Image: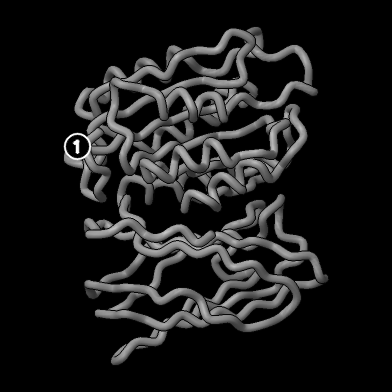
Amino acid sequence: KPQCIPNSARTFVFAYSNDLDPHVITDTFKIFNPRIFRGSIYENVGNVRFDLKQPEEIEYHWSSDFGSWNSSVYAHLPDSKLSYSSSSTGSDILTIIDKFMNNTEAPLCGSTMLILLKRYLNEVDISYIVARMRQQHVFVHVVSTIKPSGGLHIQTMYNVATKTNGLCFFTDDSNDYWVSEFLAYLVDDPYLIYATNPRVAGTGTMQLPQMPSDNYMSYNTRITVQDSGLPDRFNMLNLQFDGYRWSNYIYVNETVYLHKGTNFAATGVYLQYGPYNVTFTYDYSGTSYQTLQIRLFSNIPVADWVPYDN
């Protein structure tokens, strides 16, 4: 296989549970359009429905042929007649990821899968799939409901995202559009610059890994504030970036940057040339630990992959 380097041609796969309402798929898909894919880093695009009695294959298209992708998504909207008959059946999304990892039609290195999840997984062991994804630097960005149609474990896909430098947003289904709006960064700012997964409980301060910055720019920032469901223990967090000549910070609380009905904050931070020391201060109620996902993105290609934090 050719070496997997950050500026390799990539694939963007849109995968969605058949248990979702079709409008969720069409609303999310509307944020992607021919303009943003023309000249993007994604050479191929793909789509697949999952959680079906009869599993389907991922359909691949050239990113320049938006019409073909669009038609395929609209021809495969969720259809309740094809769903699993029991809520005790777990989602088969790990099988779909594995299929993508085995495909020979579209490039793997650095690819992105956007996954809309309605059914939880019955599995908790993700070591096999994570090892395969890390080998090819494949990212998952998951939007997961807190009102599942079946399955057992809310945290399995969050853990996959954590361990592969992806993100997992939880939503109460009242504002899928809000969530999908904030996924546009996947195409607008596709290069991951910084990723860390601090484990927090109560109140405290910790040093996070250094943040590189090779440009003067605003970095698109996404932070999950709780690792299972909606925030019920989160009070506030602050990320302080201290460089040689420049400092800045991101402060998040219930009313600042945190999106109602979700577990994530979306914002940006302007930085000049780095590197930056990063100090993280947090305040949570209770003593149970949360593993957070902090990700900064840019539209400028990077020379190296961001290291995995665990």
Q: Amino acid at mark 1?
A: Arg
The relative height of residue 160 versus residue 52 in the rendered view (above or below) is below
Residue indicated by mark 1: 38
Q: Residue furthest right?
A: 286
Nearer the observer, 218 or 134: 134
Residue 213 position in % (x across, y down): 29, 73
The relative height of residue 258 versus residue 60 in the rendered view (above or below) is below
**Quadrant position of residue 106:** top left
Q: Residue at x 44, y 40 (%)?
A: 133
Q: Residue at x 61, y 75 (%)?
A: 237
**Quadrant position of residue 41:** top left
Residue 266 visible? The answer is no
Residue 97 visible? The answer is yes
- Give the quarter of the figure containing the N terminus: top left
**Quadrant position of residue 90:** top right
Q: Is residue 104 left or right of residue 152?
A: left
Q: Residue at x 20, y 28 (%)?
A: 64
Q: Is residue 273 left or right of residue 152?
A: left
Q: Residue at x 27, y 59 (%)?
A: 304
Residue 110 position in % (x across, y down): 33, 43
Residue 190 position in % (x across, y down): 32, 50
SS state under label 1: loop
The relative height of residue 56 versus residue 222 in the rendered view (above or below) is above
Nearer the observer, 188 or 296: 296
